[in-house]
Structure formats: structure tokens, C-alpha cells
Image: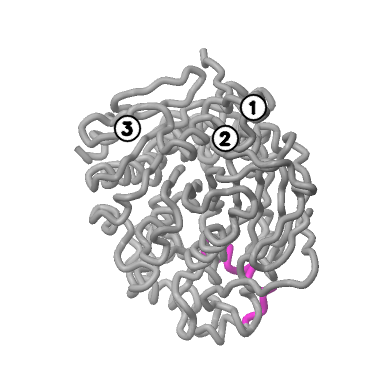
């Protein structure tokens, strides 16, 4: 069984040496008169105390970029947010990027969506910082998701940031007259804001770890490769990076814009898309879904149906991220990477007469789209001399899908374990009300340990010794848990 690990509290040490560096990773300071009010470059912020943890403050809806959806700014690189007068209310969540609602009923978000949220321990300085890049297939992004509540991280001595970035056409479609890779540019602007302002919340700008899951994890590989992001973080955690959300060449990006705009009946230009009614953009969901069966799309995509993804533009990305990483672009960054054991069960839960075939299919899809790309990433990082650690989330949820079969260790099930938010509605729906808190404590502690020390607590991954931490009812380290999958796909 799991041995519970609790991060050592330093209350006694604080009373003896108030300015000393504690095991929480921060230096304590005298209690401020009002820890919920801070001043950043743009002005004063009024935050609130967390409802989930004692002595934790949270600041919602903090702007790092101007509204990117105005006619003047649409499809262009982000610009820093303008200063404000007085004290800005940061006690409530803000907007999210423009995107189709998950229930398919219209568009949601938009407006002043280039915002971030900050959770911080009260009265501390020099804390390590973690910046969360949400996933969502580059079609959705929501930094307010309750599963991403940062209270547990702040409780344990980490300043936690969740940031938004543009998705869909606004973030990743190559349009004539527009700027390139705007979604990634948004992330870089957000990280620049963190560098310049996080000390006001008690964070250390020299100790930043970026982390994300699914498309968020994949975008971190772009950040590792981008010369524009160099020096903005020193560590990265990549969870479930997807082969479907990789990168395009300029020619492929042009073709994607051509095919997509033709189906909307407009030109692939910034002017045409800016004038296109936002309410009609809901048609995007059906168009994107139909491209998998589109012959013209298939001729160049080679089975990769993702429309919205970064492309090599010569500025944000000067090479494919995997090539840049192999060439040593991430050599100075410490990396933790892994995926869930049964990723594809998030999308297909087999049952009934074809259960056996369905199980084979879901395993193959999970290996093809998530596990083996993650394996190649680990190999590339290790071969380039990057310090890298591997993990696998193996805990099988007993929640049953619509087919009646259990979800298992599916895509995204691991996220609430990392954040310590097993009680969030999205987590209960996927992991059940009886998800083991001890496993969450174990994973959360490993992520915190990595942020503080650069080592999650097990042997590093090497090209010959592929040490991998398996997070299940029993947590252990395995020397090569993906050997069968590599051989089956002839990757060895």
C-alpha cells in the first residue's frame, strides 16, 4: 500500500528564524497587513483567501495581455495589458478564450481572455513557481476549471499560476495578414508577465516550472523549442503529450487554412475571418470533426486530423520541436514526462460483443497517439543530455462509461490527482467519489518535490535504463514498462 507522504511544515522553524529558508521552499516574511492586496506592474490587485486551504490567497482574472478579439487586434500577436487605475477586483474568475461550448450549443468566452490566476502562500518570498498550461485539443482552454485549483500547491509552498491562451482559428490557423502561432505567443507573453511580476506574490522568477496535460503538454514542447521562450522557465512537466496536436510545416499550415476556409466559404485572410460572425463559428466543430473523412485533407495530413496546431514559422518555431529538442534546445531544462496507461479509454470504452477487438483498438490508439510519442520525447531528451524523469499513471477508475465498461486509467484522469482536487465535479465524474486520496498525496508531493528540487524522487530516465514511476494503488519504479508496446510498434 502507499505510504502517505506529507510535506514538512515549518511552523516551529518560522518562530525561531522568521527569515530563514524553510522546507516549504520559501523564505518567510513578517505577516503583511493585507496579504490579499498586491501591486504588480499594471497596478493594484485585490484578491481573496482560498476556500480550500488555510493561509493561501488567490488572485483571479489578472490580465497579462490586451483583448485579442477586437477588430484591431484579431489574429495578431498579443500585446501586454495596459495599466489600470485604482484597485482591480481579482476576487472572481474571468473570461476564457473564444471557443465552442462543449455541449455544442453556441460559442463561449472571448473578450479580455488573456488572463491568469495566481495562488500563493501568505507572507512568503522566494517560493518556486509552477505555471499550468491547460489542455483541450487546441480547441478549448479554461484556466478556471475547478480541477486546476492551485490551493494545494500554495499550501505546500509553491506559487501556482494558470493561464489562458487563444485556441481554434484565433490561436493556430495560418491566415494571410495575420501573425503566426498566436496561441504559443500568448503563452510566452504570460510567462514573461510571470517573470516580471511573480515576486509580488512571493514567487521566485528564477525557479519557474511550466507544466500541462494533453494539448497543454504538447505545447510545452513548443516552448522548450522556441527561442522566444528561452530563459522564461528552468523546468517542465509534460503530461500526456499528443501526436495529434503536433506541428505543421508552413506549406501544411497554408493547406489547412485553405481547406478550412473553403468549407466556411471565406478567404484564408485575417480580414475575412475578422469579419466572419462569431456566432457562425460554431460551424467549426462540425467542420473539424468532418475533416477526418475528408479526402483532400487526408492527402497531406497523413492521418493527423488536427487543424489547430503550431507551425514552423521561423520566429516562434525555427524547427520542429522534436528536432530542436534532439539538437539540444532543452539541454538546460529539467523535465518530467509521462502519460496515462489507458489514454484512449477517455474517447472509447469498449464493451459487448466486440469487447476484445475494442480493447485491442483502444490500446493501439492510446499507444499510437500518446504513449509512443511520449516515449520518443523521453528518448530525445535523454539522448540530448537533458535531465529527464518518466512516469505512468496506471490507476484504473471504476467509473463506468456509457457502454457499461469501466473508464480505467484514461486520458485526463491523472490531473485531479496532481492538483489534489479529487472532489472537483470533473474529477468525481471520471474518477469516482472513492478515488484514493493517498495516491493523490503521492503524485502531488512528487510534482511539488520536482518544482522545489528538480528531482521528483526516483531514478532518472536513460536511453538504456528507462526508469519509470508507476502511479497505481501501489506506487513503484519499473525499469522499462513500455517494452512490449515499443516492440509491437517496431520502435526498437
- The stretch in magenta equals 276-289
User: Would you name the residue on which mark 1 appears?
Assistant: 16
User: Which mark lies nearer to you, 1 or 3?
Assistant: 1
Q: Is residue 422 visible from the viewing direction of this image? A: yes
Q: CA distance from mark 1 to mark 2?
A: 9 Å
* Most frequent secondary structure within the magenta stretch: helix
Q: Would you identify the image quadrant in which residue 5 lies?
A: top right
Residue 470 placement (x, y as % from top left): 42, 26
Q: Is residue 280 magenta?
A: yes
Which element carries disc 2, helix, strand or loop? Answer: loop
Mark 3: few/some/many CA within 10 Å (<14, 14-19, 20+): some
Disc 1 + disc 2, Cβ < 8 Å: yes
Which element carries disc 3, helix, strand or loop? Answer: loop
Q: Sequence-wise, which precedes: disc 2 or disc 3?
A: 2
Numbered badge on residue 20: 2
Q: Would you identify the image quadrant in which residue 122 lies?
A: top right
Q: What quarter of the picture does the C terminus occupy?
A: top left
Considering only vertical position in the picture, is 242 above or below 444?
below
Residue 170 placement (x, y as % from top left): 55, 71
User: Would you name the residue on which mark 3 appears?
Assistant: 460
Q: CA distance from mark 2 to mark 3?
A: 31 Å
Amino acid at each position: 500500500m502507499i505510504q502517505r507522504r506529507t510535506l514538512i511544515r515549518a511552523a516551529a522553524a518560522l518562530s525561531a528564524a522568521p527569515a530563514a529558508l524553510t522546507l516549504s521552499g520559501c523564505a518567510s516574511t513578517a505577516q503583511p497587513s493585507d496579504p490579499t492586496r498586491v501591486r504588480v506592474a499594471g497596478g493594484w490587485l485585490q484578491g481573496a483567501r482560498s476556500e480550500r486551504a488555510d493561509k493561501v490567497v488567490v488572485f483571479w482574472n489578472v490580465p497579462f495581455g490586451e483583448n485579442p478579439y477586437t477588430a484591431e487586434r484579431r489574429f495578431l500577436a498579443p500585446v501586454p495589458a495596459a495599466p489600470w487605475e485604482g484597485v482591480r477586483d481579482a476576487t472572481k474568475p474571468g473570461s476564457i478564450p473564444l471557443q465552442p461550448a462543449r455541449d455544442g450549443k453556441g460559442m463561449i468566452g472571448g473578450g479580455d481572455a488573456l488572463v491568469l490566476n495566481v495562488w500563493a502562500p501568505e507572507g512568503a518570498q522566494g517560493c518556486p513557481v509552477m505555471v499550468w498550461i491547460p489542455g483541450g485539443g487546441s480547441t478549448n482552454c479554461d484556466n478556471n476549471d475547478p480541477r486546476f485549483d492551485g490551493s494545494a500547491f500554495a499550501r505546500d509552498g509553491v506559487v501556482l499560476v494558470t493561464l489562458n491562451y487563444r485556441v481554434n482559428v484565433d490561436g493556430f490557423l495560418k491566415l494571410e495578414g495575420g501573425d503566426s502561432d498566436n496561441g504559443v505567443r500568448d503563452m510566452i507573453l504570460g510567462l514573461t508577465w510571470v517573470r516580471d511580476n511573480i515576486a509580488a506574490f512571493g514567487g521566485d522568477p528564477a525557479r519557474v516550472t511550466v507544466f500541462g496535460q494533453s494539448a497543454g503538454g504538447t505545447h510545452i514542447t513548443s516552448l522548450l523549442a522556441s527561442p522566444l521562450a528561452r530563459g522564461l522557465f528552468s523546468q517542465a512537466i509534460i503530461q500526456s503529450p499528443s501526436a495529434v496536436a503536433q506541428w505543421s510545416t508552413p506549406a501544411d499550415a497554408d493547406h489547412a487554412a485553405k481547406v478550412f476556409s473553403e468549407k466556411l466559404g471565406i478567404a484564408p485572410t485575417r480580414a475575412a475571418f475578422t469579419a466572419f460572425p462569431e456566432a457562425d463559428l460554431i460551424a467549426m466543430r462540425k467542420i473539424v470533426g468532418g475533416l477526418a473523412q475528408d479526402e483532400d485533407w487526408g492527402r497531406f495530413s497523413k492521418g493527423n486530423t488536427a487543424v489547430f496546431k503550431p507551425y514552423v514559422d521561423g520566429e516562434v518555431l525555427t524547427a520542429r520541436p522534436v528536432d530542436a529538442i534532439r539538437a539540444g534546445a532543452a539541454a538546460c531544462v529539467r523535465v518530467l514526462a509521462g502519460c496515462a496507461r489507458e489514454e484512449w479509454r477517455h474517447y472509447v470504452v469498449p464493451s459487448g460483443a466486440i469487447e476484445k477487438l475494442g480493447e485491442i483498438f483502444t490500446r493501439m490508439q492510446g499507444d499510437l497517439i500518446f504513449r509512443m510519442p511520449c516515449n520518443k520525447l523521453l528518448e530525445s531528451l535523454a539522448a540530448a543530455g537533458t535531465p529527464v524523469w518518466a512516469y505512468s499513471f496506471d490507476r484504473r477508475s471504476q467509473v463506468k462509461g456509457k457502454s457499461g465498461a469501466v473508464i480505467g486509467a484514461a486520458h485526463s484522469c491523472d490531473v485531479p490527482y496532481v492538483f489534489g482536487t479529487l472532489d472537483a465535479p470533473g474529477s468525481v465524474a471520471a474518477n469516482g467519489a472513492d478515488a484514493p486520496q493517498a495516491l493523490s498525496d503521492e503524485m502531488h508531493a512528487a510534482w511539488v518535490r520536482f518544482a522545489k528540487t528538480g528531482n521528483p524522487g526516483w531514478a532518472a530516465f536513460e536511453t538504456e535504463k528507462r526508469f519509470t514511476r508507476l502511479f497505481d494503488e501501489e506506487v513503484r519504479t519499473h525499469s522499462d514498462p513500455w517494452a512490449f508496446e515499443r516492440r509491437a510498434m517496431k520502435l526498437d
